[in-house]
Image (cartoon, rainbow, N blue to C red):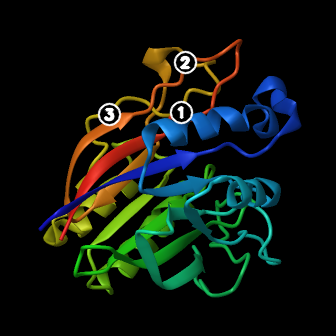
Amino acid sequence: MAVQMKFMSFNLRVDNTGDGINSFSNRFHRVVEVLEREKPHIVGFQEVTDGMRATLRDRLPGYTVQGCGRDRSYHGESMLIAYPTDRVELISLENLWLSPTPSIPGSTYGGDQSGCPRMFTSALLKINGVDTPIRFINTHLDHVGKQARFLGAMQLVQYISQRPEPFVLTGDFNATPDAPEIGLITKTLADRGVVDCTANLGGTFHNFGRLLPDRTVKIDYIFTDMSCSDSYVVEDIPVNGQYYSDHYAVCTTVELG
Protein backbone atom coordinates (compact mmCIF):
# COMPACT_ATOMS: atom_id res chain seq x y z
CA MET A 1 0.00 0.00 0.00
CA ALA A 2 1.31 3.44 -0.92
CA VAL A 3 2.29 5.80 1.88
CA GLN A 4 2.00 9.57 1.49
CA MET A 5 4.48 11.85 3.20
CA LYS A 6 4.85 15.62 3.20
CA PHE A 7 8.28 16.98 2.27
CA MET A 8 9.39 20.56 2.93
CA SER A 9 12.27 22.72 1.71
CA PHE A 10 12.90 25.53 4.19
CA ASN A 11 15.61 28.19 3.93
CA LEU A 12 15.78 29.57 7.47
CA ARG A 13 18.04 32.57 6.74
CA VAL A 14 21.25 32.68 8.80
CA ASP A 15 21.08 34.21 12.26
CA ASN A 16 22.14 37.77 11.50
CA THR A 17 21.78 40.42 14.22
CA GLY A 18 21.58 43.00 11.43
CA ASP A 19 18.13 41.62 10.61
CA GLY A 20 16.84 43.20 13.83
CA ILE A 21 13.39 41.91 14.68
CA ASN A 22 13.86 39.30 11.96
CA SER A 23 17.08 37.82 13.35
CA PHE A 24 16.65 34.09 13.92
CA SER A 25 16.74 34.29 17.71
CA ASN A 26 13.81 36.74 17.59
CA ARG A 27 11.69 34.83 15.07
CA PHE A 28 12.44 31.22 16.01
CA HIS A 29 8.99 30.93 17.59
CA ARG A 30 7.52 31.71 14.16
CA VAL A 31 9.60 28.93 12.60
CA VAL A 32 8.23 26.54 15.22
CA GLU A 33 4.69 27.75 14.46
CA VAL A 34 5.18 26.89 10.78
CA LEU A 35 6.50 23.42 11.54
CA GLU A 36 3.75 22.69 14.08
CA ARG A 37 1.05 23.89 11.71
CA GLU A 38 2.35 22.27 8.53
CA LYS A 39 3.56 19.06 10.19
CA PRO A 40 6.03 18.07 7.46
CA HIS A 41 7.33 14.52 7.70
CA ILE A 42 10.77 15.22 6.21
CA VAL A 43 12.42 18.64 5.97
CA GLY A 44 15.48 20.00 4.21
CA PHE A 45 16.71 23.16 5.99
CA GLN A 46 19.23 25.55 4.44
CA GLU A 47 21.39 28.36 5.93
CA VAL A 48 21.58 26.72 9.35
CA THR A 49 24.53 28.04 11.36
CA ASP A 50 26.03 26.28 14.40
CA GLY A 51 23.81 27.96 16.98
CA MET A 52 20.71 27.49 14.85
CA ARG A 53 21.58 23.82 14.39
CA ALA A 54 21.85 23.35 18.15
CA THR A 55 18.53 25.12 18.67
CA LEU A 56 16.75 22.94 16.12
CA ARG A 57 18.16 19.76 17.64
CA ASP A 58 17.12 20.83 21.13
CA ARG A 59 13.70 22.23 20.33
CA LEU A 60 12.18 20.04 17.63
CA PRO A 61 10.69 17.22 19.68
CA GLY A 62 9.97 14.08 17.72
CA TYR A 63 12.48 14.87 14.96
CA THR A 64 15.97 13.54 14.38
CA VAL A 65 18.20 16.24 12.86
CA GLN A 66 21.22 15.29 10.72
CA GLY A 67 23.96 17.29 9.02
CA CYS A 68 27.18 19.22 9.55
CA GLY A 69 28.64 22.62 8.71
CA ARG A 70 30.10 23.34 5.28
CA ASP A 71 33.43 24.81 6.42
CA ARG A 72 36.74 22.94 6.66
CA SER A 73 36.13 22.55 10.39
CA TYR A 74 32.62 21.07 9.84
CA HIS A 75 31.23 24.25 11.37
CA GLY A 76 29.31 26.98 9.57
CA GLU A 77 26.14 26.74 7.51
CA SER A 78 24.65 23.28 7.11
CA MET A 79 22.08 21.61 4.86
CA LEU A 80 20.17 19.93 7.68
CA ILE A 81 17.79 17.03 7.23
CA ALA A 82 15.03 16.41 9.78
CA TYR A 83 12.71 13.41 9.97
CA PRO A 84 10.33 11.86 12.55
CA THR A 85 12.30 9.64 14.91
CA ASP A 86 9.46 7.17 15.42
CA ARG A 87 8.67 6.69 11.74
CA VAL A 88 11.96 6.85 9.87
CA GLU A 89 15.15 4.82 10.26
CA LEU A 90 18.48 6.16 9.03
CA ILE A 91 20.37 3.59 6.94
CA SER A 92 23.29 5.80 5.86
CA LEU A 93 24.29 9.47 5.80
CA GLU A 94 26.72 11.41 3.59
CA ASN A 95 27.88 15.01 3.82
CA LEU A 96 29.56 15.90 0.52
CA TRP A 97 30.97 19.11 -0.92
CA LEU A 98 30.10 20.48 -4.34
CA SER A 99 33.61 20.44 -5.73
CA PRO A 100 36.03 18.21 -7.67
CA THR A 101 36.97 16.72 -4.26
CA PRO A 102 33.58 16.17 -2.59
CA SER A 103 34.94 14.32 0.43
CA ILE A 104 37.24 17.20 1.43
CA PRO A 105 35.46 19.58 3.84
CA GLY A 106 35.34 23.19 2.71
CA SER A 107 36.38 22.41 -0.88
CA THR A 108 34.90 24.39 -3.78
CA TYR A 109 34.89 24.58 -7.56
CA GLY A 110 36.77 27.88 -7.52
CA GLY A 111 36.35 29.97 -10.66
CA ASP A 112 33.33 32.23 -10.35
CA GLN A 113 32.16 30.63 -7.10
CA SER A 114 31.70 32.88 -4.09
CA GLY A 115 33.90 32.42 -1.05
CA CYS A 116 31.25 30.11 0.42
CA PRO A 117 31.80 26.34 0.23
CA ARG A 118 28.69 24.56 -1.03
CA MET A 119 27.60 21.05 -0.14
CA PHE A 120 24.75 18.60 0.10
CA THR A 121 23.58 16.17 2.75
CA SER A 122 22.19 12.84 1.60
CA ALA A 123 20.35 10.31 3.75
CA LEU A 124 19.17 6.83 2.83
CA LEU A 125 15.99 6.39 4.84
CA LYS A 126 13.73 3.45 5.63
CA ILE A 127 10.14 4.62 6.12
CA ASN A 128 7.79 2.57 8.28
CA GLY A 129 5.35 0.72 6.04
CA VAL A 130 7.40 1.22 2.87
CA ASP A 131 9.46 -1.69 1.54
CA THR A 132 11.96 0.31 -0.54
CA PRO A 133 14.30 2.83 1.14
CA ILE A 134 14.34 6.35 -0.30
CA ARG A 135 17.20 8.79 -0.67
CA PHE A 136 16.63 12.30 0.62
CA ILE A 137 19.08 14.97 -0.53
CA ASN A 138 19.24 18.59 0.60
CA THR A 139 21.46 21.29 -0.90
CA HIS A 140 22.13 25.01 -1.39
CA LEU A 141 23.82 26.11 -4.62
CA ASP A 142 26.07 29.15 -4.92
CA HIS A 143 24.50 32.61 -4.91
CA VAL A 144 27.19 34.23 -7.12
CA GLY A 145 28.71 31.91 -9.71
CA LYS A 146 26.63 30.71 -12.66
CA GLN A 147 29.28 28.17 -13.57
CA ALA A 148 29.55 27.01 -9.96
CA ARG A 149 25.78 26.50 -9.82
CA PHE A 150 25.80 24.51 -13.07
CA LEU A 151 28.70 22.34 -11.91
CA GLY A 152 26.95 21.79 -8.59
CA ALA A 153 23.75 20.73 -10.36
CA MET A 154 25.76 18.41 -12.61
CA GLN A 155 27.42 16.82 -9.59
CA LEU A 156 24.00 16.25 -7.99
CA VAL A 157 22.68 14.69 -11.20
CA GLN A 158 25.68 12.37 -11.41
CA TYR A 159 25.31 11.42 -7.75
CA ILE A 160 21.61 10.59 -8.18
CA SER A 161 22.20 8.73 -11.45
CA GLN A 162 24.65 6.38 -9.73
CA ARG A 163 22.14 5.41 -7.04
CA PRO A 164 19.06 3.28 -7.74
CA GLU A 165 16.85 4.33 -4.86
CA PRO A 166 13.85 6.61 -5.44
CA PHE A 167 14.81 10.11 -4.31
CA VAL A 168 13.62 13.50 -3.15
CA LEU A 169 15.92 16.49 -3.69
CA THR A 170 15.22 19.74 -1.85
CA GLY A 171 17.09 23.00 -1.75
CA ASP A 172 17.72 26.64 -2.43
CA PHE A 173 19.20 26.49 -5.93
CA ASN A 174 19.66 30.26 -6.31
CA ALA A 175 18.37 29.80 -9.85
CA THR A 176 15.09 30.64 -11.56
CA PRO A 177 13.11 27.94 -13.42
CA ASP A 178 14.53 28.96 -16.81
CA ALA A 179 18.16 28.65 -15.64
CA PRO A 180 20.38 25.99 -17.28
CA GLU A 181 21.06 24.27 -13.96
CA ILE A 182 17.36 23.64 -13.36
CA GLY A 183 16.90 22.32 -16.90
CA LEU A 184 19.92 20.09 -16.40
CA ILE A 185 18.22 18.34 -13.48
CA THR A 186 14.87 17.79 -15.15
CA LYS A 187 16.22 16.86 -18.59
CA THR A 188 19.18 14.69 -17.59
CA LEU A 189 17.07 12.72 -15.13
CA ALA A 190 14.06 12.50 -17.46
CA ASP A 191 14.59 8.76 -17.87
CA ARG A 192 14.05 8.47 -14.09
CA GLY A 193 10.74 10.28 -14.45
CA VAL A 194 11.96 13.23 -12.40
CA VAL A 195 9.55 16.10 -11.85
CA ASP A 196 9.85 19.54 -10.32
CA CYS A 197 7.07 19.36 -7.74
CA THR A 198 7.22 23.16 -7.37
CA ALA A 199 6.92 23.89 -11.11
CA ASN A 200 3.58 25.70 -10.80
CA LEU A 201 4.42 27.71 -7.71
CA GLY A 202 5.21 31.41 -7.59
CA GLY A 203 8.18 33.21 -6.07
CA THR A 204 9.83 31.89 -2.94
CA PHE A 205 12.38 34.58 -2.01
CA HIS A 206 10.80 37.79 -0.70
CA ASN A 207 13.62 39.34 1.39
CA PHE A 208 11.53 39.78 4.54
CA GLY A 209 8.71 41.36 2.55
CA ARG A 210 10.89 43.91 0.79
CA LEU A 211 9.95 42.39 -2.59
CA LEU A 212 6.40 42.98 -3.76
CA PRO A 213 4.46 39.80 -4.62
CA ASP A 214 5.04 40.23 -8.35
CA ARG A 215 8.79 40.70 -7.73
CA THR A 216 9.44 37.62 -5.60
CA VAL A 217 11.86 35.12 -7.12
CA LYS A 218 11.42 31.37 -7.36
CA ILE A 219 14.69 29.73 -6.27
CA ASP A 220 13.52 26.99 -3.86
CA TYR A 221 12.66 23.55 -5.26
CA ILE A 222 11.61 19.99 -4.55
CA PHE A 223 12.45 17.37 -7.20
CA THR A 224 11.54 13.68 -7.14
CA ASP A 225 11.22 10.62 -9.36
CA MET A 226 8.11 9.56 -7.45
CA SER A 227 4.56 10.86 -7.73
CA CYS A 228 4.00 14.23 -6.01
CA SER A 229 0.90 16.35 -5.50
CA ASP A 230 -0.61 19.17 -3.46
CA SER A 231 2.48 21.37 -3.73
CA TYR A 232 2.28 24.85 -2.24
CA VAL A 233 4.17 27.82 -0.85
CA VAL A 234 3.73 28.31 2.91
CA GLU A 235 2.23 31.75 3.42
CA ASP A 236 4.15 34.18 5.61
CA ILE A 237 1.98 36.97 6.97
CA PRO A 238 4.20 39.21 9.12
CA VAL A 239 3.31 39.85 12.74
CA ASN A 240 4.35 43.38 13.72
CA GLY A 241 6.86 43.30 10.86
CA GLN A 242 8.28 39.90 11.80
CA TYR A 243 8.46 37.07 9.22
CA TYR A 244 9.37 33.42 9.72
CA SER A 245 12.15 33.78 7.11
CA ASP A 246 13.19 35.75 4.05
CA HIS A 247 12.15 32.73 1.94
CA TYR A 248 8.81 31.02 1.81
CA ALA A 249 9.00 27.36 2.75
CA VAL A 250 7.65 25.03 0.05
CA CYS A 251 5.84 21.73 0.59
CA THR A 252 4.72 18.77 -1.49
CA THR A 253 3.17 15.38 -0.80
CA VAL A 254 5.09 12.41 -2.22
CA GLU A 255 3.62 8.95 -2.70
CA LEU A 256 6.06 6.28 -1.49
CA GLY A 257 5.96 2.57 -2.18
Task: Please identify the quarter of the rendering in which residue 190 is found.
Answer: bottom left
For the N terminus, the image quarter is bottom left
Q: Which residue is mark 3?
A: 201
Comparing 51 with 117, the one in front is 51
Q: CA distance from mark 3 to mark 1?
A: 12 Å
Kindly identify which numbered label has been placed on residue 205: 1
Q: CA distance from mark 1 to mark 2?
A: 14 Å
Q: Which residue is mark 2?
A: 237
Relative to residue 12, is residue 51 depicted above or below?
A: below
Q: Residue 19 vs residue 93: left or right?
A: right
Mark closer to the observer (1, 2)? 2
Q: Of helix, strand and loop, which one carries label 3?
A: loop
For the C terminus, the image quarter is bottom left
Q: Residue at x 26, y 59 (%)?
A: 186
Comparing 200 with 183, the one in front is 200
Q: Which mark is first along the chain, 3 or 2?
A: 3
Q: Position of residue 70 (x, y in %)?
A: 71, 69
Q: Residue 94 vs residue 170: left or right?
A: right
| Amino acid under disc 2 | Ile
Q: Residue 156 vs residue 75: left or right?
A: left
Q: Of helix, strand and loop, which one carries label 1?
A: loop
Q: Is any part of residue 38 visible from this angle?
A: yes
